[in-house]
Amino acid sequence: MTEIFDIPLRAIDGQTRTLRDHAGKVLLAVNVASRCGFTPQYAGLEALYRRFAPRGFAVLGFPCDQFGHQEPGDNAEIQKFCTVNYGVSFPMFAKVDVNGDTAHPLFRELKRGAPGLLGTEAIKWNFTKFLIGRDGKVLRRYSPTEKPEDLAGDIEKALDAT
């Protein structure tokens, strides 16, 4: 299995990064979109980030346009939308694919670490969430319908784990 902390990522500002920047933190990686019925979850994700960041938690947003063309903008437009409409301050990354041959390597690893229903790996829609422990292991996958505020208990447990 690939060490997820070493997978190259492109931040929304174009800088090359890795999750090594967040090593030792509990992470919630989410494929997001600006024109989705679940887009208001940005507010809940930001609330989780602000609540738990002091304890070593980060939300990581990965815009994706693979579901109904619901993320048509470029990275600058996406960043502006998130900041202006939802006050997003958590790390955002450049647009990625999460399924198919062009799926980003991070999402390949996340899906492998936490398959969906009946063992399927495909992500079904925007705002699928993956909780990652401090050690980089995927702890759980959440469907788009699971609201960010409902994840607080699992985040607490992951933060308290040593």
Image (tube, rainbow, N blue to C red):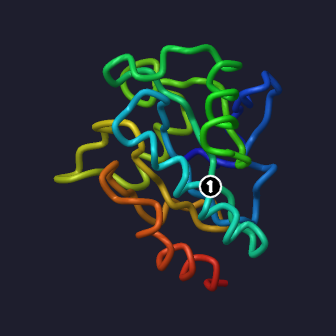
Residue at 56% from the left image edge and 55% from the top image edge: 45
Residue at 41% from the left image edge and 70% from the top image edge: 150
Residue at 63% from the left image edge and 85% from the top image edge: 160
Residue 39 on image: x %, y % = 44, 39
Residue at the extreme left of the image, as rendered: 118
Residue 71 on image: x %, y % = 47, 22
Quick check: 30 above or below 93? below
Secondary structure of the residue carrying numbered label 1:
helix
Quick check: 8 above or below 142? above
Residue 96 on image: x %, y % = 54, 25
- The answer to whether residue 151 is left or right of residue 96 is left
Q: Looking at the picture, which amino acid does disc 1 mark?
A: Glu
- The answer to whether residue 103 is left or right of residue 91 is left
- Residue at image mark 1: 46
Q: Give whichever of 60, 78 is nearer the camera.
A: 78
Residue at 75% from the left image edge and 66% from the top image edge: 24
Q: Give whichever of 74, 116 is nearer the camera.
A: 74
Quick check: 150 above or below 7? below
Q: Give whichever of 13, 87 is nearer the camera.
A: 87
- The answer to whether residue 92 is left or right of residue 119 is right
Q: Give whichever of 98, 148 is nearer the camera.
A: 148
Numbered label tally: 1
In which image quadrant can residue 82 be found?
Answer: top right
The residue carrying pointer 1 sits among few (fewer than 14), some (14 to 19) or many (20 or more) residues within 10 Å by Cα, namely some
Q: Quadrant of the C terminus?
A: bottom right
